[in-house]
Amino acid sequence: EIVMTQSPATLSVSPGERATLSCRASQSVSSNLAWYQQKPGQAPRLLIYGASTRATGIPARFSGSGSGTEFTLTISSLQSEDFAVYYCQQYNNWPGTFGQGTKLEIK
Amino acid sequence: QLQLQESGPGLVKPSETLSLTCTVSGGSISSSSYYWGWIRQPPGKGLEWIGSIYYSGSTYYNPSLKSRVTISVDTSKNQFSLKLSSVTAADTAVYYCARHPPSITGTTTPLVDPWGQGTLVTVSS
């Protein structure tokens, strides 16, 4: 089973600033990496797949990069609605393992 | 627009079997190359994949839960179901059903989109 490790566990950023979240895989997952956003009381929603492709309706301030074992989610200018928990997931192999999440909070 | 809705008891006694159903609307559960899955999230914790099924009945299960999990599909009702036996308090979680889209080459993948809204199941006597 591929282990996904996210860092940091909590990230404090001011609105309007840039946020950078990291995700590392225990072995190569090629570009088969997704990012999800989860707000309190809601189901996660797909933000990014293929490491860098935005899902339908996702604003351009969200961008993903990386391949192999190292991945990054960048939010270029944080809006109030972006403060949430973010999960990465590898879907190169079954089971599609998730990272433990990064909580993005208002500074 | 595809929608998934979980249903089932919100309270289950320890040692009993948790049973949930996911009803799919706005699309067919028999669509080629799509798996359908269950994922859970204990309160305040992260996401754990439980298992997934193809309309033909082919399944993948989380090895850590495999001995207690059964996932089945009913294409006539556009539904799939989860049974988790011998539950304990550790199985208390929000349970999500979801669709797994294929890759651009048509390969089945565990990518998740969309998710159901989730249903909280509490294990308690």
Image: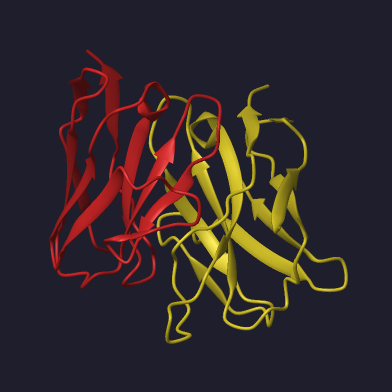
Chain colours: A red, B yellow
> Can see residue B97?
yes
Please provide percent x and percent y for residue B107: 45, 84
Please provide percent x and percent y for residue B16: 69, 40
Please provide percent x and percent y for residue B94: 57, 35
Q: Residue at coordinates 50% horizontally, 70% vertically from top-left?
A: B60
Instruction: Report the front residue among B5 and A2.
Output: B5
Instruction: Report the front residue among A74 and B6.
Output: A74
Does residue B48 lie above or below A66 as drawn?
A: above
Please provide percent x and percent y for residue B76: 87, 73
Q: Residue at coordinates 39% horizontally, 65% vertically from top-left?
A: A95
Instruction: Report the front residue among A72 and A18.
Output: A18
Does residue A63 lie above or below A30 as drawn?
A: above
Q: Residue at coordinates 31% horizontally, 45% vertically from top-left?
A: A62
> Can see residue B87?
no
Instruction: Report the front residue among B49 and A105.
Output: A105
In what quadrant of the picture does the N terminus of chain B appear? bottom right
- The extreme right residue here reads B76
In the image, taking residue A43 as reference, residue A53 lies left or right, namely left
Q: Residue at coordinates 46% horizontally, 53% vertically from top-left?
A: B49
